[in-house]
Image (cartoon, helix red, strand yellow):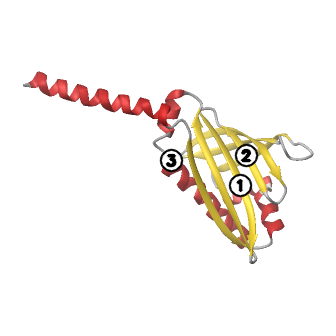
Amino acid sequence: MAKKIFKIIGIILLVLILIFLSLGLFVPKVEYTTKVTIKGNKSEVWDAFNDIENVQAWIPNVTEVVPINITEDTLGTKVKMTVIDRGNTMEMEETVTVFESGQKLGLHFDAGQMLKDDLYTFSEKNGMITIVGNHSCEGADYFSKCIFALFKSMFLEIDQGYMDNFKTYFEGK
């Protein structure tokens, strides 16, 4: 009887491990969208969103932003960001991948085990500015891809929180 129970438990564990490991194949990237609507002037919202001097005001985990390479046309600009999350210090490199002034901003983050791309689109209607963020996150290795597939709701909650923080920051200026 005990052998049968251990065999069943072993089979269940094996199935769970196989399901976990298949996540990296079937969900190699986690993709999600965030959105916020802000009352204000579009160019002022754009400028505030792109001001690396004030990023800590709306992304509280960022403790330091150090320019690595600032380009004339902004495209390709790189900065090193230091982030503290749950007591752990992490450094990441942010690169501007899309820059259409007042319209679109694309960012690529390399945080070692996590590679993340954000594309923000700005639109205006009736004095309200809407920022839509399309995000994709993937692990740098297969095991990380498997893990990140389980955290879509957490990534969405964090990035939506940053968008909401930006709205509060901008409208409170």
Which of the two discs, 2 and 3, labels the residue nearer the N terminus? Answer: 2
As displayed, is residue 157 above or below residue 27? Answer: below
Front in this rendered view, residue 11 or 2: 11
Per the image, the residue denoted by label 1 is 120
Q: CA distance from mark 3 to mark 1?
A: 18 Å
The reply, left or right, for residue 108 in relation to residue 151 is right
- Work out which quarter of the rendered image holds the C terminus and state it: bottom right
Front in this rendered view, residue 78 or 87: 78
The reply, left or right, for residue 128 in relation to residue 24 is right
Label 2 with label 3: CB-CB less than 8 Å: no
Q: Secondary structure at mark 3?
A: helix
Q: As drawn, which residue projects farthest toward the front?
A: 26
Q: Secondary structure at mark 1?
A: strand
| Mark number, residue 33 | none
Per the image, the residue denoted by label 3 is 152
Q: Quadrant of residue 112?
A: top right
Give the residue type at disc 3: Lys
Q: Residue at x 83, y 53 (%)?
A: 100
Give the residue type at disc 1: Tyr
Label 1 with label 2: CB-CB less than 8 Å: yes
List x then y, in percent, for residue 131: 69, 62
Q: CA distance from mark 1 to mark 2?
A: 8 Å
Per the image, the residue denoted by label 2 is 107
Which of the two discs, 1 and 2, labels the residue nearer the N terminus? Answer: 2
Give the residue type at disc 2: Leu
